[in-house]
Image (cartoon, grey):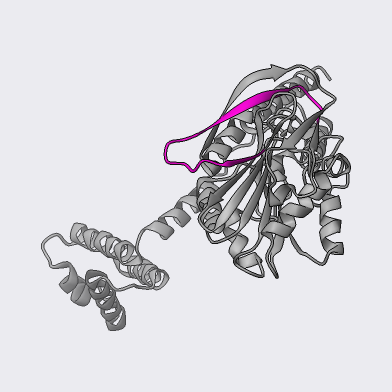
Amino acid sequence: MRERLPTLLLALGALLLFYLLFVPKPQRAGSPEGLPLSIDGRADGYLATWRWLGAQHIRRLSLRYRYGRLPTLLHRPTGNLLLLTLPQRVPMQADELDALRRWIDQGNTVLVVAALDDTPLWSFGADGTLALTDLRRLTGLKFTSTSTSLLHGRQLEFVGVDAQPLLAGVSRLQSVAALPAGNWSERPLPGASVPLTLATRRNLGTPALWLQSRGAGQIILCAAASPVSNAGLLLADNARFLANVVSWSVGPGGTVVFDDAHEGLAAFYDAAAFFADPRLHRSLGWLVVLWLAFVLGMQRMRAVRAPWQAVDEGAYIDASARYLAAVVRSEDIGRRLIEEFIAEIRRRAPRTDPWDWLRSASGAPERDYRALERFHARTRSGARIDLITLQTLLARLRRNHLT
């Protein structure tokens, strides 16, 4: 028992060290209010929009692949709308951004709802810097924080600047700041197109909704992420605004695409999502428990010394012979056996040729002499020989003619 406790502690320490150094850690869990997914019916999900589109017989698609797959999944190459939420749980890759730009240039629309002026619960702990980088790369706009509001749980109101088709019948938009949020100002980068401001913050007068042309398509950017969520559609004229966006940007046979892949609902392999899955950690935990139970409960903790046994000389000789038979060629062994036999004849008759002596003076039968000559010729030519037959022949010649 005294040996088992140190063994248990050392095993647990080794497992802990392996986990800290090599195992990716779980990512942030989903919000109790939901995630921005087309299948999520909670407050921050998009299930209400998904069902409304179905009731209106408008094509819809849950995108669970990278943006490069968009052209192959849509019914038409143009006249489609993509709902993109920032920040993303699965960041977009550089080649994806290029594919998304080309898709917009062909004549499609992207509605970007970014958690800038509001901070939904699902965005807590997300990489805000990466979201700003994605915005800059996609729209050419650089966003800078001007102040931070410590108030939360209050509604933000956006009002239209001029009469625009996208704001027809829309007097105000609302968003709920679930967590403290910031105030942002935008500045186009050199060479980027200047967007059209559609709406501003009522209390600050700063822009909060933009329309930007890109090729044959356009980007609609909203500085709040929650106006088109399940809960957001119940506020002010948010539902009317979403209906205007769909009516204005989706052509005949077009599709409304929900970017579920980059919010964690992906059909491709995602290492972060794999290691964040609690089922993986439960399975590994059970494996560790069973391994510790096996090591500590069934294995002997002390080595048992085997009693001393004398070395079997016969077994040693047999093993050596088997080794030599496996690595030494039969013709080399046969040549050596014949050379030893000839050396014995020279010692017996030093002044006579060994082969002449064996043929004439030894009295050996002619057939044995001829057989030995054939063996000798085959060993010199490198041909394989039957060692058992050769050894039998040499033993008979020694016994009958050399003793």
Q: Quadrant of the N terminus?
A: top right
x and y, in percent, of residue 40 in the image: 84, 47
Residue 204 versus residue 326: which sits nearer the camera?
204
Q: Name the residue at 75% across, 20% down.
A: 9
Q: Name the residue at 74% across, 30% down.
A: 118
Q: Splitting the image into 4 quarters, where does residue 291 fall?
A: top right
Q: Quadrant of the C terminus?
A: bottom left
Question: Is 391 drawn above or below residue 146 in the view shown?
Answer: below
Q: Could you tell whether 218 is left or right of 84 in the image? A: left
Residue 358 versus residue 288: which sits nearer the camera?
288
Is any part of residue 295 visible from this angle?
A: no
Residue 69 versus residue 2: which sits nearer the camera?
69
Question: Is 86 drawn above or below residue 304 in the view shown?
Answer: below
Question: Is 19 drawn above or below residue 252 in the view shown?
Answer: above
Q: Which residues are magenta?
A: 176-198
Q: Splitting the image into 4 quarters, where does residue 27 fall?
A: top right
How many numbered discs sit on the rendered protein? 0
x and y, in percent, of residue 35 in the image: 79, 41
Residue 23 versus residue 137: which sits nearer the camera?
137
Q: Name the residue at 57% across, 39% down.
A: 134
Q: Splitting the image into 4 quarters, where does residue 281 fall?
A: top right
Q: Could you tell whether 138 is left or right of 268 in the image? A: left
* Residue 185 lies in the magenta-colored region: yes
The residue sitting at the front extreme is 163
The residue sitting at the bottom extreme is 367
Q: Name the residue at 86% across, 51% down.
A: 48
x and y, in percent, of residue 12 in the image: 74, 24
x and y, in percent, of residue 39 in the image: 83, 52
